[in-house]
Each structure stands twice: as C-alpha cells, then as structure tokens.
Image (cartoon, rainbow, N blue to C red):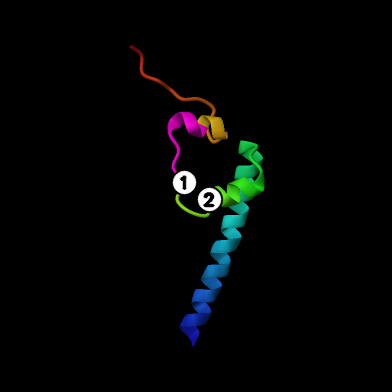
Amino acid sequence: TGEAVEIEITAKQIIKIKEKLNKILEKHTGQPLEKIEKDTDRDFYLSADEAKEYGLIDQVIKPKE
C-alpha cells in the first residue's frame, strides 16, 4: 500500500541522516566510526566530564566558589 511505501522511504531517509551524523561525530570527536555507530544505536548518556573525554565538548564550565 501507499502507507507502507511512505514508511519505507522515511526509514531509508532516517538511516541516511544517521550515517551522515555519525560521520560528523567521527570527524569532530576523534572516535572510531564503529564506536560511534555502537554508541548511537541506542540512547547514550554522558556526564559533562564524560562528554569532554569522548570529544563532544571542549570544556566543562564549573561555577565559581
């Protein structure tokens, strides 16, 4: 049916976007593509310090004491 075709088209588009995003993450984080694909396959949560170590952010801003 037309609905099944639309779902298939949307699914293929989502896969293409995910592949592009993973390549961008690989380039900017320095992580291997295989690791990024595994990490982004499901929900993947990081603390601020973990995000820095992963390469997603440059620094963690901490409040002045």
Q: Residue at x 49, y 88 (%)?
A: 1
53 is higher (above) or lower (below) than 11 = above
Percent position of residue 39, x then y:
54, 48
Q: Quadrant of the C terminus?
A: top left
Q: Mark 2 points at which residue?
A: 40
Crowding around mark 1 (Cα neighbors within 10 Å: few <14, some 14 to 19, many 20+) is few
Which secondary structure lies at badge 2?
loop
The answer to whether 32 is drawn above or below residue 37 in the figure is above
Q: Which of 38 and 9 is in front in this view?
A: 38
Where's residue 4, x and y in %? Answer: 49, 81
Q: In this view, does 19 lie above or below 7?
A: above
How far apart are labels 2 and 1 at the CA level? Answer: 6 Å
| Magenta run includes residue 3 | no
Q: Which amino acid lies under the numbered mark 2 shown in the image of this protein?
A: Thr
Could you tell me if the residues under marks 2 and 1 are in contact, i.e. CB atoms within 8 Å? yes
Residue 63 appears left or right of 35? left
- The front one of 47 and 59 is 47
Q: Residue 44 carries which label?
A: 1
Instruction: Count up the numbered dots.
Output: 2
| Element type at mark 1 | loop
Q: Which residue lies furthest to the top in this view?
A: 65
Q: Position of residue 35 (x, y in %)?
A: 61, 46
Q: Does the magenta stretch include residue 46?
A: yes
Which residues are the magenta region?
44-51
